[in-house]
Image (spheres, coloured by chain):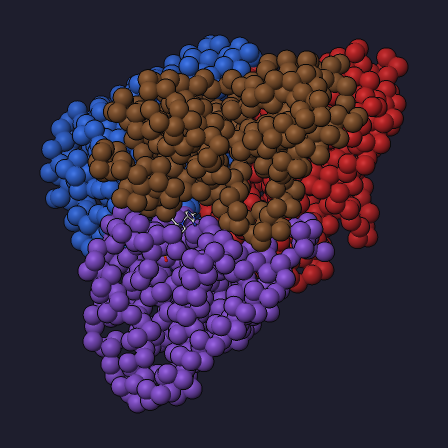
Chain colours: A blue, B purple, C red, D brown
Amino acid sequence: MNVETAPALSDPALAASDLDDLGLGRDDYRTLYHTMRLQREFEERVYRLFRQGRLVGAAYAGAGHEAIAAGSAYALGDADILVPMHRVIGAHFLRGHTARDMMCQYLGRANGPTAGKDGNMHCGNWDHHIVGMISHLGANIPVAAGVALASKVRGDGAVSLTYIGEGGSSIGDFHEGLNFAAVHRLPMVLIVENNKFAYSTPTRFEYACENIVDRARGYGVAGALVDGTDVRAVYKATRDAVELAREGGGPTLIEARCTRLLGHAQHDDAFYVPRDIMEEGWNNDPVTKAENLLLERKYFTREEIDGIQEEVNGIVDDAVDYAEQSPLPEPEAALQGVYAD
Amino acid sequence: MNVETAPALSDPALAASDLDDLGLGRDDYRTLYHTMRLQREFEERVYRLFRQGRLVGAAYAGAGHEAIAAGSAYALGDADILVPMHRVIGAHFLRGHTARDMMCQYLGRANGPTAGKDGNMHCGNWDHHIVGMISHLGANIPVAAGVALASKVRGDGAVSLTYIGEGGSSIGDFHEGLNFAAVHRLPMVLIVENNKFAYSTPTRFEYACENIVDRARGYGVAGALVDGTDVRAVYKATRDAVELAREGGGPTLIEARCTRLLGHAQHDDAFYVPRDIMEEGWNNDPVTKAENLLLERKYFTREEIDGIQEEVNGIVDDAVDYAEQSPLPEPEAALQGVYAD
Amino acid sequence: MPPVTYLEAISSGLREEMERDESVFCLGEDIGVYGGAFKITKGFLDEFGEDRVIDAPVAESVIIGAAMGAALMGMRPVAEMQFADFITCGFNQLVNNVAKTHYRWGAAVPLVVRCPSGAIGNAGPFHSQNPEAWFCKVPGLKVVAPATTYDAKGLLKSSIRDNNPVLYFEHKGLYRFPRIREEIPEEDYTVPIGEAAVRREGVDATIVTYGKMVFHSLDAAETLAGEGVETEVLDLRSLLPYDKQAILESVRKTNRLLVVHEDTLTGGFGGEIAAVVAEEAFEHLDAPVRRLAAIDTPVPFSPPLEQFFLPNTEKVTAALRDLLAY
Amino acid sequence: MPPVTYLEAISSGLREEMERDESVFCLGEDIGVYGGAFKITKGFLDEFGEDRVIDAPVAESVIIGAAMGAALMGMRPVAEMQFADFITCGFNQLVNNVAKTHYRWGAAVPLVVRCPSGAIGNAGPFHSQNPEAWFCKVPGLKVVAPATTYDAKGLLKSSIRDNNPVLYFEHKGLYRFPRIREEIPEEDYTVPIGEAAVRREGVDATIVTYGKMVFHSLDAAETLAGEGVETEVLDLRSLLPYDKQAILESVRKTNRLLVVHEDTLTGGFGGEIAAVVAEEAFEHLDAPVRRLAAIDTPVPFSPPLEQFFLPNTEKVTAALRDLLAY
Ligand SMILES: Cc1ncc(C[n+]2csc(CCOP(=O)(O)OP(=O)(O)O)c2C)c(N)n1
Ligand SMILES: Cc1ncc(C[n+]2csc(CCOP(=O)(O)OP(=O)(O)O)c2C)c(N)n1
Ligand SMILES: [Mg+2]
Ligand SMILES: [Mg+2]
């Protein structure tokens, strides 16, 4: 699949037959749904903690991006490397960060992945092959390219998967990173999560092309445009891209369309988002969509779905308890870790 | 003309009828040819001065780029703004920098355009609507966009014309600058001088797309691919782009193909350039090509062409004499001009 | 006029300049309908329109570069970095292109880059930095960092009217700081770039500082005043150029110097001040020049770490005691 | 082994590390077939192949960012900036991404960025700069600046073997400087990061310097030696971390300090040194701490301007005389 042949967003091909045949079984669907639901509940809890004054720092959420997070990261093998952005906490869960880990991270605890050095989504963990997110948008695309360069040179078969918002795609590092990966045909997949806004800025102030994926040709890489609210579509596009990358076909630029269902962060009520966009977004809520699919296809019964919901609630409750009981770091720990030994 | 309809490089349309009808008269051709010849002779002299130890600093030349320099800048009106790069000294001449000015600049004289503060092509001059080149490749593309933004907001009808090598097109500022200009439909024209090498680096290590102009679509701007050794083709593409920009149609990305006929700079013998590329380049020497055209079409006789050559030689001789007799700056002048009053 | 906040002062300073001079315009991320991440430009879009309040793509290099282009054309852009931390993405434009233009070829580049800086509590390593020192070493740039509401407005106006590029550091911790709400003049006024202000007079020691640390320094001075020590607190306000005369005069009077900033110690701007005093007021010094600053690490996120990292009133007081004890 | 140049020492150090350790590779503009703008990697492409000698697009941010990615994977990239001046285009990657990674989430980023720096005669404002000070204020980075041929090789090896990001400043004016051609050991050796070297012992004054200025300082010391003054010349070699003990020890012995660097004065790294000495060796100082540096302007192009701009032996000598006359 390249940009020339990428189906348009409304192409019914994406919706049906094509996606029934992904080779995914009941367990896979359970994991995908569980991950999406966990992202939703976890982040709702984070927002609640924020309102209650129990959070440390700011609260971001990926509501509306759950299918991208789960569907993409599920296409990775263990040896692959995740280079995540701010709306894909589900990908962290799939790679091995637990809800406890992430809640400790959000609450700045000594036993979180960064031991309180950094907060919220800003954590990496080399044990799980997760590169720590940096705030500076786009700056990890060159890093993902470098990760892929190492894999290519060593022939270890690993692929790096990274993300950027459509807003972040305006920055120089997007261009430099993707171009470098293209030139060296590096095993990298770049997903642009196009949720129609960069903070408050609508796409007409961000880019003037029709689709971000139209840029693929200008880099000489494969491109795909997918419905980012459909976890199967995201999974399929990522899997194809990962395969292509593993075979030496170089990077793929995937544009995944979705809607940011909340404000930019907790403090933002998204007043600037036209009501119809928000409504359409909620009508296409990826979590509900996945749930409906699972029910329709009779992969799971209503009771089983409710069971997953309960399980997830329990995980999040436990994570909050655990994190709140976990120690804050010792002040002097601030001095440690600037340099590796 | 946009990227979809841009004729391919080999399209005969570019070569003939299309270009006969440009509305250019004998005087225009004289100016264009004179400019190209002056660029060639001036820069050859700069190289010679370098070898003789009479130059200050490094010697760059735009041999092979003369048609781009002259053809593009000739499409500008007086109020338009030139934002030049290192291989288009001809564009400086067309905008009003004299050979004396530029030689004083190369020799670091007090009466050069930068009064010795900067050297060689690194000079701007607001009287001539020329923005000073910065070495950092690509960094003037955002500046050209800002110039165009001012024109758009004020409605002064001016267009900014800037350049980048195909090598420099890999840098973030290319992306940020062109994207910004596209979003705001700014009156800017960006010419990529694709001369097959960035210093020693061949295009396969620079980009993986077929043509740089393939990027136009990804920015939502018009694109054109032209034979950069044909001054008429460059003139036409630039003129069309300037017109489009003036009418509010936004920026155009023009890829002008040519061959760098010398090394990157005086110290570089270009050993890494395959002989056939160099040969083909010289066979398509834009200056000779223009000369042949002028003769074939009988715009000028051999004698007249020789007359231009003599005139140009005289101008360059005079420029060297003038510059060498001009004073170097006073040492203490180094302290002045850091800040505007 | 009722008392206003530091944030309101910046906002009204910017608005008045835009009203006064058509060539002034704003450029930055989310400054339009959203009014900016910190709401400095709230309402500006309605008042001035899309041509003068430009929502930029997330791309700091072109924000600064385009501002330079417009400035060359005689406009006076005021670019906003959403957080000062992101200015590193436009670093080359500032230090090589913007800063060197007038020296190189004589064109003025009158632009302002507004940089919301500083730590405000658990915002982590990328939303808390004080990046001013990088720019204080770049000839061709000017750098200001107002601490008071009056200065915030007056220095912004001076920055916009200056014919040179000015980096305007506004400490986020001052935006709504109740203590600095103040009544400011209705009529137009400016604060000159390059002049420090004595915030408290004293004869026993001098604190040279700027930005939010002015208040920790004043509080420390107040504490020690209770013990009979009179500390002079000098608010630099401008860092490049900075008011060397005022610093030297004060040190010549008090014979002791403590430099305080929120930026990290090593390579921070305090080194420059300390060095200049050690050179030019050497014989007036009765004690070693001291510096107090954040520790040499990234800004950590978790509360105990961040508190350990940052200078505060207690640490300033302790450093001052130390200095006096010498 | 016959005497080699500084340039050859860098080259052979890099080659030996690549031979020793498969994970070491080079990345930069024109480093392949061309062997680098200054020919440091001449012949490397043939010897090590395209996978280990990677010609990068003109894009410094991805050069540094990709180096970081590869370093996370356990490789040891050595990135080349064609000129140190262009590092500003990768500034954000270095100061925010590379530098903070280990502190933030514990991953080591063992990479080296080689930066050919300094003025070599009429190369103008963009090919002559000494940008080290910007990085000396960034916790998480290391910065070295060898002055001798022996150190050039030994510090490069240490930098490559270090588990942290190291900026390696190589002064272009030393590449083929005949005076520092020297025989260096055949066998593997390293020079530790963080240790200064006394280049000349003395008791009357200390010059703290680094890079090419070491030689102007030695020459000035030599001149004054003819007049009976013994100047100690301390070559820092490493700037972050720098050898504070060596500086303090020397100043405690000589009681006079002159700091010399080729970078511009205000905000240059000399301020940090001067400040530390003014704080920690205050009572040993018999004279004000002095700094000599380039003037606070961009690097001008034309010979008289550039000479006026740069520090040189005469200026160091004059500053030293001044210091001694106090
Ligand atoms: C270099 C840089 N500039 C500005 C910001 C501030 N910022 C954080 S997120 C954001 C909007 C991002 O929009 P987009 O990339 O579309 O991602 P989304 O939040 O919509 O998922 C901005 C402007 C930043 N983090 N980094
Ligand atoms: C940011 C930056 N990096 C590196 C350089 C060094 N450099 C100067 S010209 C050049 C090659 C440019 O190639 P290209 O853009 O194709 O232009 P050409 O010289 O071929 O006309 C390089 C690498 C630079 N000037 N700026
Ligand atoms: Mg978005
Ligand atoms: Mg080229």
Residue B127, placed above or below residue A50:
below
In-image side of A173 versus C43 (left or right): left
Q: Is residue C45 visible from the viewing direction of this image?
A: no
The residue shown at (46%, 47%) is C59
The residue shown at (37%, 19%) is D185
Whole-percent x and y of residue C55?
Answer: 51, 52
Q: Nearer the viewer, residue D211 or C33?
A: D211
Direction front: furthest residue: D226
The residue shown at (26%, 50%) is B272
Whole-percent x and y of residue D4?
Answer: 38, 30
The residue shown at (49%, 43%) is D85
Q: Nearer the viewer, residue D60 or B30?
A: B30
Q: How many marks?
A: 0
In-image side of C285 versus A13 (left or right): right
Residue C265, placed above or below residue B329:
above
Instruction: Choose top left, top right, bottom left or bottom right for residue D6.
Output: top left
> Looking at the figure, which quarter contains the C terminus of chain C?
top right
Whole-percent x and y of residue D240?
Answer: 52, 24
Q: Nearer the viewer, residue C245 or B329?
A: B329
Q: Is residue D303 visible from the viewing direction of this image?
A: yes
Whole-percent x and y of residue D300?
Answer: 59, 50
